[in-house]
Amino acid sequence: MAEPAQMRMTPSRRAILTELARACHPTADEIYRRVRRRLPRVSLGTVYRNLEVLQTSGLIRTLLDARGQRRYDARLDDHCHVRCEECGRVDDVRVLSERPLEESIEDDHGYEIRGHQLSFVGVCPECAPDAKGRDSSIDAGRPRPQRR
Amino acid sequence: MAEPAQMRMTPSRRAILTELARACHPTADEIYRRVRRRLPRVSLGTVYRNLEVLQTSGLIRTLLDARGQRRYDARLDDHCHVRCEECGRVDDVRVLSERPLEESIEDDHGYEIRGHQLSFVGVCPECAPDAKGRDSSIDAGRPRPQRR
DNA sequence: CGCAGGAGTGATTCCCATTCTCATTGCGGG
DNA sequence: CCCGCAATGAGAATGGGAATCACTCCTGCG
């Protein structure tokens, strides 16, 4: 799913990809400021729009930092992250199977680890595309999807 | 760490805890609407303030749904979540060691699983309270912590 | 008992990340 | 060369969350 739909590789999109590969999990605003250094006329709206497009096309990934702000990732494979609760910074975690994960993060990255989370992401039965009957009696008033 | 600091158990705080135990991972706004049913004079600001206080006191936990909105959890033990990308709903995952996790989530909860994340949360070396020298030469312009 | 000081609160405003609107631009095909 | 549509720039709108402020309510103490 999420095939590289028809999408033009425009200069602003190319620049976003370049900056994304260079910086480590930047926010939309960081990307915006970097892209502007070479394409000064690019607007913030364009950056957001294209990040959305690139993600839909499967070229980049979105993630959330510890405060809930979106950050973007050029790596497409599954991997772990460490997220700083203070500044929002996000780092990749190198997984070395022979060492306990928390310990190696503290040693290798200098983070003071306070916790971890394992979460799964998907679509709940109420939102399932096939909409198999099932109008929830509980929490009935929930509005339909609606992108945030 | 995070000892139950001195904190009065006021009616609004009690109501928040009650509603939190009843609903499953509500947002601040959902808690607000529920609390208001019994304490109609409570304001949204109070709810946000008290959620912050309760979390600092270690009585509740904060988590982020798939869209980055904060949700609150009365359970204090470590456990996994499933998060719906469409509506934001979050469910607890029952971990049964004898079955593959994704499979049991699909079966038990009806979610269509699209992915998972393992992430660690902590404080990065630059934000470490002891501030051991280390002013980053890379990415120098980063402003100091500053809550969001 | 009366009071000072601090915690808690309601109402409101502010801030900022993200989205939306809309007029304009420019590429690609005919 | 012209049309149509995707892409864009500029800026307004949205919405979650935090902050401000004046006021109320305890609580400990004299």
Image (cartoon, coloured by chain):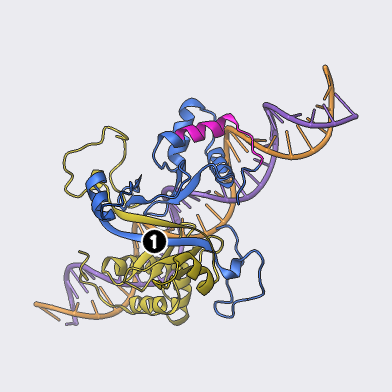
Chain colours: A yellow, B blue, C orange, D purple
Q: Residue A83 appears at what percent x and percent y? A: 48, 64
* Residue A17 found in image quarter: bottom left
Q: Main secondary structure of the magenta part?
A: helix
Position of B95 relative to A49 (above/below): above
Question: Which residue lies at the image location 33% right of the left edge and 68% below the top edge?
Answer: A78
> Badge 1: few (under 14), some or many (20 or more) residues near its Cα, within 10 Å?
some
| Number of marks drawn | 1
Query: Split into 4 quadrants, where in the image is the N terminus of chain A?
Result: bottom left
Q: Which residue, given by chain and number where applicable, does mark 1 sit on? A: B118
Position of B45 relative to B123 (above/below): above
The subunit letter for the residue under badge 1 reads: B
Residue A26 visible in the snapshot: no
Q: Nearer the viewer, residue A49 or A121?
A: A121
Residue B64 visible in the snapshot: yes
Q: Residue A115 appears at what percent x and percent y? A: 49, 57
Question: Which residue lies at the image location 50% right of the left edge and 35% below the top edge?
Answer: B17
Q: Residue A38 appears at what percent x and percent y? A: 44, 82
Left or right? Give the position of C26 relative to A95.
left
* Residue B101 found in image quarter: bottom left
Q: Residue B56 appears at what percent x and percent y? A: 58, 47
Bounds of the magenta span? B6-19
Question: Which residue lies at the image location 34% right of the left edge and 67% below the top edge?
Answer: A61
Q: Kindly identify the amino acid type of the residue bearing the numbered disc 1.
A: Leu
Position of B99 relative to D29 (above/below): below
Question: Which residue lies at the image location 45% right of the left edge and 74% below the top edge?
Answer: A24
Tell whether position B20 is magenta.
Answer: no
Tell whether position B10 is magenta.
Answer: yes
Task: Identify the element where label 1 is drawn.
Answer: strand
